[in-house]
Amino acid sequence: MTGALLVAGTTSDAGKSVLTAGLCRMLARRGVRVAPFKAQNMSNNSVVTLDGGEIGRAQALQARACGLEPSVRFNPVLLKPGGDRTSQLVVRGKAVTTVGARDYITHRQWLRDVVADELASLRDEFDVVICEGAGSPAEINLRATDLANMGLARAAHLPVIVVGDIDRGGVLAHLFGTVAVLEPEDQVLIAGFVINKFRGDVSLLEPGLEQLAQLTGRPTLGVLPFAEDLWLDAEDSLGVVGDAPVGRPGPPVGDEWLRVAAIRLPRISNSTDVEALACEPGVAVHWVSEPSRLADADLVVLPGSKSTVTDLEWLRRSGIADALTARAANGGAILGICGGYQMLGSVIDDGVESGAGSVPGLGLLDLEIEFAPDKVLAQVAGDVNGIPVRGYEIHHGRVRRTGDAPLLTASDGAKEGSVRGSVRGTHWHGLLENDAYRRALLTEVAQRSGRTGFVVAPDTDVAAVREAQLDLLADLVEQHLDVDAIDALLGGRTPIARPTIRSSTS
């Protein structure tokens, strides 16, 4: 098998990432050498690769689905929003500049060359490349400068599958309209549709699918059922909703639950850090966005941020800063990660990200942070009180001074993080995915909160949970998609009629 295809979506969060991961795992299980590719991503959930760069977390998960280590080749262009109008531009894993929406257009030609080179290289090396689009190909106002959707498909001659989320409502109109607004030269590349998150009796949907095929000349290649067990490694912060639960934890091993409040910052980054806690039986994790929700939590997590000073100001305006201060005074457990760690300190000197200069932090740690223009990108290892841990770092802020005890010792002997009473913090992402450390932390939190009935599960394995979800995705693809039709697309055979259709506005 040789070939490539593009998974596009009617909207953001329609299911492009999970369908791409499912296709990758299905093919890998059949012995196909497959790689993922997302030409351009916009996400603040990223990971550090072995080749020393950062890519979107979804592409790291898709690489895992293929049995590969994450690489900057799989996501050559990454935009990390720092505000409503600006984003950090990361190319081949390295931050190169900050751009606004209009400024970004000036970079498109050389970025188009970067994308084309990386995709061609992957197609030379692998049997199959499964590409993921960005947002929706129906954003026709952006078509002239598109790198990741129909611009990529037309340049690389890729057949396109369009996925729509039926949970949003109006999915048949979304699928029809996505094709109808495209230029004829783009329309001919649309090979078929996939419907995601269907609940109920699929026979009730079938008449609509038949009409959709009649209207567009394109088949629906499958209807994926809603699967509540699929929730790890969410790429889009739009899915991180205030006052919503994270995951679906099993019942407690003991007779008490442990409650975790994760603060939903406006510019949250690497929100996936808290997902490991939600894998634990008896641990209920909720995103929170107002101070009253901290009152009954056993642990509060202050996660990373792409705009640390701005989100710190939001903490103060929302009243959460005062709630954190009161919590620390009463001995309540608080964990800060990366930007959240920086906010817990006494001073943040930021002439890089916000340009605000020196601003006071929350003062819950004896810590001074100074931002530098170059970003720390590293995979790291060390130990916490003799427990081996691994993680990764992505940040501009450096510790200028600390008077607190370190949280951990890196493998090179350097001290990292801070502990002061019930408050602790670290620049390391992924720390909670270390099973032994997570168990020790939850045991300490339960003791501090007086939850004597909480018993930490002895066998929760986050890596195994992630692998199980990837296998579930592949199972759903095999059971509910027309795999023969997909094989035909990847083999360069195109038996599907692809007429041009016209909308009422054409």
Image (tube, rainbow, N blue to C red):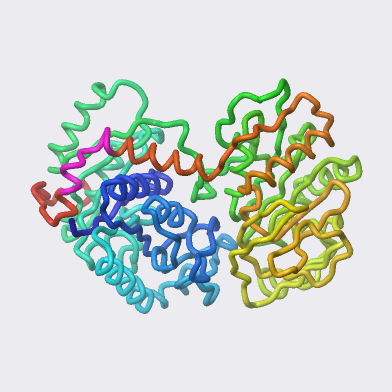
Q: Residue at x 78, y 31 (%)?
A: 296
Q: Would residue 396 be counted in the magenta stretch?
A: no
Q: Would residue 485 be counted in the magenta stretch?
A: yes
Count numbered badges in the picture: 0
- Most common SS among magenta residues: helix
Image location of residue 178, percent across then percent down? 27, 48
Image location of residue 342, percent across then percent down? 75, 61
304 lies above or below 469: below
207 lies above or below 236: above
Q: Residue at x 62, y 24 (%)?
A: 251
The outermost residue toward the right is 329
For the residue pair 401 and 290, the one nearer the viewer reads as 401
In the image, taking residue 25 as reference, residue 292 lies left or right, namely: right
Res 92 → quadrant: bottom left
In the image, taking residue 346 as reference, residue 464 lies left or right, namely: left
Image location of residue 200, percent across then percent down? 34, 22
For the residue pair 296 and 468, the one nearer the viewer reads as 468
Res 186 → quadrant: bottom left
23 lies above or below 141: above
Q: Residue at x 44, y 39 (%)?
A: 469
> What residue range appears in magenta?
478-487
For the residue pair 456 and 426, the one nearer the viewer reads as 456
Q: Is residue 26 visible?
A: yes
Q: Quadrant of the N terminus?
A: bottom left
The outermost residue toward the front is 386
42 lies above or below 331: below
Q: Is residue 310 visible?
A: no
Q: Residue at x 73, y 23 (%)?
A: 256
Image location of residue 218, percent across then percent down? 16, 43
